[in-house]
Every structure is written in C-alpha cells, then in structure tokens.
Amino acid sequence: MSKTVLIADDEAKIARLAQINLMRAGFEVMTAADGVEALASIEQRRPDLLILDVMMPHMDGFTVLERLRADPKTADLPVVMMSAQTKDADLLRAQHLGVAHYLPKPVNPAELLRVVQEELEAGD
C-alpha cells in the first residue's frame, strides 16, 4: 500500500512540482493551499507525512504545527517544513516542534524526495 503525503503550500507551482515528483515515486499525494485547509484535510484523512510551508494565508505553518503537536491524534505526525524563511529563529522553532527536516526554497525535487523517503522509512 502506498504512503500518503499531504503538501500544504500556497504557491501552486511549487505544490504541483512536488506533487508530480512524489506521485512518480509511488506516493499518494494530497494538497492544501493554506494552513486551515491542511488541518481540515488531516482531520478527514491523516496522511503518513506532511510537507508544510511556513508562510501561508489564513494560518501559517508554525501555527499548523503547534496545533498538530497539541493534539494526541496528530502529535507524532512526521513533518517536513520548506520555506524561504531560513533565519536561525525559524530553524530553531521548527526543531523545537519536532521537525526533522527544514528545506529552504526553492527546494530541489530530488532532495525533497530523498527527505520524504527517509522520514517515512524512519517511521516504519
């Protein structure tokens, strides 16, 4: 059975590129255009991994992550963050919230695939 990945990113081109590459690698991929939509998607169908942008409308990635970590049903959901925000404070905040990988945008598609596979294998 293929693993499911949710991509939460308001930049449609970036989300689509990641979606295509992950689908080619055999993953089932869902997308969300903002943090509110991401939380609603996770509530309906929990993915195996979340790729989360930081800067999004309605609710930013850190707020989404804090809500996921506060809920026992999603506290252990693996999250890969990707963002143009690469200040040390952002990296430390992500690390504190249990993010193993924080990828700077623009993300190399091969690197994103490697990180997703690594995270999912670590959870098996």
Image: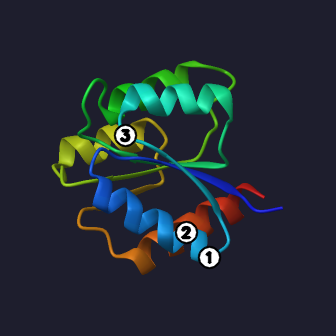
User: SS of the residue at dot 2?
Assistant: helix
Circle on res. 33: 3
Pinpoint residue 106: horizontal percent, then vertical percent.
23, 67
- The C terminus appears in which quarter of the rendering? bottom right
- Looking at the image, which is closer to me, 40 or 117? 40
The alpha-carbon separation of the residues under discs 1 and 2 comes to: 5 Å
Q: Residue furthest bottom?
A: 110
Q: Position of residue 84 (x, y in %)?
A: 19, 54
Residue type highlighted by circle 2: Leu
Q: Which residue is mark 2?
A: 22
Q: Which mark is residue 25?
A: 1
Please tell me which of labels 2 and 3 falls first in the chain.
2
| Residue 122 position in % (x across, y down) | 68, 61
Query: On the picture, is 123 further left or further right than 79?
Result: right
Task: Pinpoint residue 112: horizontal percent, then vertical percent.
Answer: 44, 69
Considering the image in quadrants, where does the N terminus appear?
A: bottom right
Mark 3 to mark 1: distance in Å? 22 Å
Left or right: where 79 falls relative to 2? left
Query: Mark 3 or mark 1: which comes first in sequence?
Result: 1
Q: Nearer the viewer, residue 87 or 28?
A: 28
SS for tag 1?
A: loop
